Image (cartoon, grey):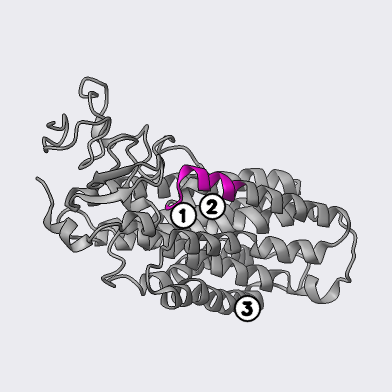
Amino acid sequence: MTCDHCGRQVPDAVFCTACGAHQGTTGQSGNPRLRHTHYAAHPGEHVGQPSVFSTIFPHLGHGRIHEFRYAFLGALAVLILLVGTGLVVAALLGAIFLVPILYLVYLYEAQVYRDEPATVLGFTIGGGVILGLVVSIVADKVLQGTGKETTVGQIVGLTVILPIVQVIAMALPAVLLRGRPAFPETIDGFAFGVASGLGFSVAEGLVRFSNVFTDQGLQTDSANWIAPLLSVAILIPLLHGSAGGVVAASLWRRDRSGNARSLGLAGVVVAVALSIAFYLVGELLQINGVAALVVLAFQVLPVAALLVYARFLMHHALLEEAADMGFRPAVCPHCHRHIVAAGFCPSCGVAISAGPRSQADLGDPMAAGAAEVR
């Protein structure tokens, strides 16, 4: 059939495998080719939905997403139980490593690193940890005062200067992989940026709570530790991972003319602005004596905004890059059907490049490129 939107000859199905648009929607309001009601990596969700797992684990199918979600919730319940029993040090250590360990499992399951696991993991998570240690130790020495009152200079340093340095540093290891032939797609850059950001969050958490680890005993009073636990287990990893992913993906992505400068600048600005908002809101509320759990509730807003921006960035990148893909055999990571497709599954509309590499790379990729149908 001829696609209603791109005009290419494609299989008769619900979605165009070339442009991803939903067939038979030309009369609807808005631009159906943008398909904002069907997120390219997970078509059952809206692009503007701040879903955590389908955003930072874009290569996992619907069923696997639930497995990671349940694993995270189960581990979080165990950490809260540890705090309740006074094992604060063990809970904090588990919280620092929770999301990064899940992401390591994701990288293995989805084979995002293809045939270069040592290079990818070394540059991303390893590089993020090293830079995170350097930045966090220097910031702790320079910006943390010895007095009881926080000065204006310290507030500016902790909530403005430090987030800028963090965003640049955490994305740097992932950006070093840009240009390698094995990782040409924007979704690769996003995955590597998230990994680098999570490595950075591990280092920051270890430095931040180093005094707790050395001074507290095996058991300690658990009062007032729930908020720090939730911050280090959820908000900080999501903030750093999303910021690193957005910056790396923005620099990876090119517009149709091949220019990456304006797109990259926009991603950096958004990541920096929302990171500053996260720390600035938290610091000002704490200074005014607002309860810690209320502070966390306000800090959720910039993190959610960063996740939504990352989804729109990835969604449009997947739509644009699919235009250059040829037909090849694959197993849909979403509906699990064996298909012959270009950029999108003709049955459910998921982007094929957002699936596990073991499924998305079925067939000869060189032959697939030569078989492109226009």
Residue 48 coordinates in the image, percent (x, y): 43, 37
- Tell me which amino acid carries mark 2: Ala
Residue 311 coordinates in the image, percent (x, y): 41, 46
- Tell me which amino acid carries mark 3: Ile
Q: Quadrant of the C terminus?
A: top left
Disc 1 marks which residue?
A: 273
Check the image and report above or below for 337 versus 184.
above
Q: Choose mark 2 or mark 3, whichever is in front.
A: 3
Q: Does 58 sit left or right of 65 as displayed? A: left
Q: How far is disc 2 from disc 3 in space, using C-alphas?
A: 22 Å
The disc label shown at residue 277, or none: 2
Magenta-span inclusion, residue 284: no
Residue at (47% x, 73% y) in the render:
121
Q: Residue furthest top?
A: 27
Residue extent of the magenta highlight = 59-69
Residue at (37% x, 62% y) in the render:
189
Tell whether label 3 touches label 2 (CB within 8 Å).
Answer: no
Tell whether label 2 touches label 1 (CB within 8 Å).
Answer: yes
Magenta span dominant secondary structure: helix
- Tell me which amino acid carries mark 1: Ala
Mark 3 crowdedness (10 Å alpha carbons): few <14, some 14-19, many ≥20: some
Q: Quadrant of residue 42?
A: top left
Check the image and report above or below for 25 versus 57.
above
Mark 2 crowdedness (10 Å alpha carbons): few <14, some 14-19, many ≥20: many
Q: How far is disc 3 from disc 1 in space, using C-alphas?
A: 23 Å
Please say whether residue 268 is visible from this viewpoint: no
The disc label shown at residue 137, or none: 3
Please say whether residue 86 is visible from this viewpoint: yes
